[in-house]
Image (cartoon, helix red, strand yellow):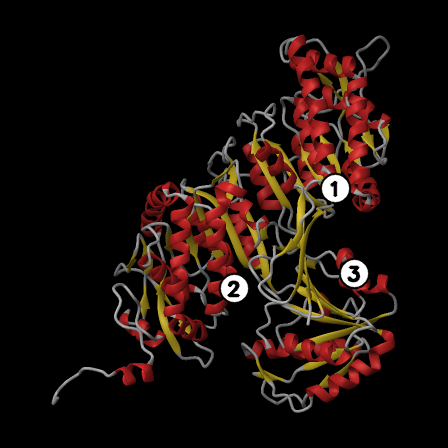
Amino acid sequence: MAGSTTRTVFDIFQSMEFGPNAGSSPATAQAWLEHHSRCLGFFIHGKFVLPADRRSRSLSDGKGGEVCRVACAEEADVSQCAASSVSGFKEWSGMTCHQRADVLLSLVSVLGQHAQCVSELCELCEASGSPSALVRLLQYYSSWAQLRDTLVTGWTPLGVVEVVTSDDCSLYSLMLKVLPALAMGNSVVVVPGRSCGPPTLLLAHLFTGAGLPNGALNVLTGCDMTLAAKVAQTPSISYVSYSGNKQDGVMLCKSTAGMGVPVSVSPCIGATCPFIVFESADIDSAVEEVIEAAFKKRKEVHWVLCVQESVYDSVVARLRLRMSGMKCVALLSESDGGLVEAAVQEAQQQGATLVQSSAAPPSRAHYPPTVLCGAAPSSSCVVSPSPGPLLPLMTFRSNSEAVTLGNHSPHGQAASIWTEDLTLALETAKSLSVGSVWVNSHSVFDPCLPVSGHKDSGTCTDGGQEGLYQYLRPSSSSSLPRSSPVALDYSAFGTETAPPVIPADLSGAPQSYLQLVGGKTCKSVSGGSVAVRPPEGSNVLGYCPDGGRKDVRNAVEAAIKVQPGWMKKTPSARAQSLYSLAKGLKAKWRNIASSVYIQTGVSVEEANTEVDLSVARLNVWAAYCDKVQGGSLPMPKSGSALSFPEALGVVGVILPDKPSLLSMVSLLGAAIVAGNAVVMVPSEKHPLPVLSFIQVLQSSDLPAGLVNVIAGGRDQLTAALANHSVIKAVWYWGSAEGCQYLQNTCTSPLKTLKLSCQTEEKDWTRSDPALLEELWRDAVQWKSVWIPTA
């Protein structure tokens, strides 16, 4: 028929276009950007918002052309977003688990429908993130949304979660934090980096159009990390989770210190990861994959190739053959070219030889793929790699030397192991201080695999069931009280202490207590002591050591010597040690109850009850030892995936004022059950029950140095623990100023923080399983191991 616009079935199948859908985005990224006049605003309460007077920043593609402009949020936008997120949380958390799962599952089809647009926009913005990987994330977390009240009982959502990423972070890393937070019933405010801004805005638009309540997912864009701090300052934010480079993460931690909101950091960009090739490996496959990882894929991490000496010549020969004819790699800027050339020259001066695909071009905008054979472990190309296509190569002789090289870096993100010997692979995987280990493969990611940064590579776990708990809290506990940062001289914190009281004549005086370091009782290094008095009254109950930085140093030295051996003990052996500790406490019942009675001012019955509960709590922790040990994971591909918890290392614990004994055994048990060593600081007000407990520790079969007790001023000892590089975590009960100091200071290296103000009333007498599980999870870090099969 003339003039007809009716399309035939053949035409539709030829184009394979989707029909019109209310609220859907245009079919291509360019059309979507043109629809918004290439100037993107914020996504607040289910719609795009672009105030006329907002500053904007330009986003360019890899060729320098402008993709679009993105608005920079201000105070009014932050307030509007916060109000929307609160209302979104009420609606989203009020839905049943099944209803939330249905919404997330429906997003799978929506994302599949608009996969082309999402993929094109990610490519334009250079934000790594394939639609198929995002679909897998949605499928995985929609099922966890369904099972939350079944398998994660006794926990409740935090409220409004802020997710922040740096400019160079991938879209996958961002959504790995957004989707589990939504699945657990939280609302989310996203502050994306430069490259992830447009794709995140598109996804928020698609998700809301598919049934996500207005306000459950809001997006604010800005020009730097100051916006993330402004959002965190709003009282509605309950938790901040960051992913990206280390520098921006440290800046975020420092700028949010004192706000009363916990911040977790996942520095997934720029880490140095070992690629270990043993003589029993399939050399051809290993060389092929190291070329792929180091030179062909987008490098979010820097690889260091470690080769066993017996196959060094074979590996280098294959590298030369495989790299011949490879094209030069484009650098981000000419300044990067100068850094690459300087790193290569330094490595050559230290004895390294080059394997290059071609000669370096005159222009500094490109550089050929280069292997630095024989690089020194102390070389800057190994310790702090430049952004260019450089691959340092080091050699090792034995398995233990391979582990030493693998653990040489301050980072602990991932490692790739190549060997056909499964026993060797698993032994090496257990010994490496990294969160993810890939055997005969590399860069295998799936949401069921927990991703936990060790050492300086993060303070939280993403992925798997383990990653859900950062977005939940026990139903019976409360969140940190919000506060405002105070003017605090961080360099002077903990240095102003009252002069120690040293009695001239101790004959006939109250008892002088000692602290415990390395299994032996001793005075403080300074020799000072302070008088301890009851809550009411001026009479002196005893004299306690006034410990300081040198005492902490000695305690940490003792702890680090014994902790690896304690961690390697079987769970049943650790359980027997805890049972003996509980038995020893029961044997010293009268003495410990007396110290609780005279120190805290409670009645005799209450003191006896606290000792009784403390014995029971130690028995609970002993039973916990061999009950939670990870397991195999259901991967959607051929192979085996394992996850298991590991000890943090040495944990510093600044104990609450009350109940002084019960809180101490609760925290002590959680730490040592997981394989950690502990440096404990008793309450400054009520130290006697903990100092009396030292005799129980000495009579137990715990290794000498596993538990150390340092008494003294809380601020002084907090500063000493925070500034000790070996301490892996600090659990703190104290003042708001102390919490602020720790959040600002424990960033280099990163420390896991558990902070509570003394104004909080925590019921330690409850045996709520969720409360005990929370303590245990604070004491472990997770490791995943992926073993592929044919």
At 40% from the left edge and 59% from the top edge, which residue is drawn? 222
The answer to whether residue 334 is left or right of residue 406 is left
| Dot 3 amino acid type | Thr
| Dot 2 amino acid type | Cys
- Outermost left residue: 2
Q: Which of marks 3 and 1 is in front?
A: 3
* Res. 717 in view: no
Compared to 658, does 67 lie above or below? Answer: below
Most foreground residue, 625 or 221: 625
Helix, strand or loop under label 2: loop
Marked residue nearer the N-terminal end (2 or 3): 2
* Res. 654 in view: yes
Q: Quadrant of the N terminus?
A: bottom left
**Which residue, given by chain and number where applicable, does mark 3 sit on?**
428
| Dot 1 amino acid type | Asn
Compared to 212, does 372 lie above or below? Answer: below
Compared to 605, does 734 lie above or below? Answer: below
**Which residue, given by chain and number where applicable, does mark 2 sit on?**
169
Marked residue nearer the N-terminal end (3 or 1): 3
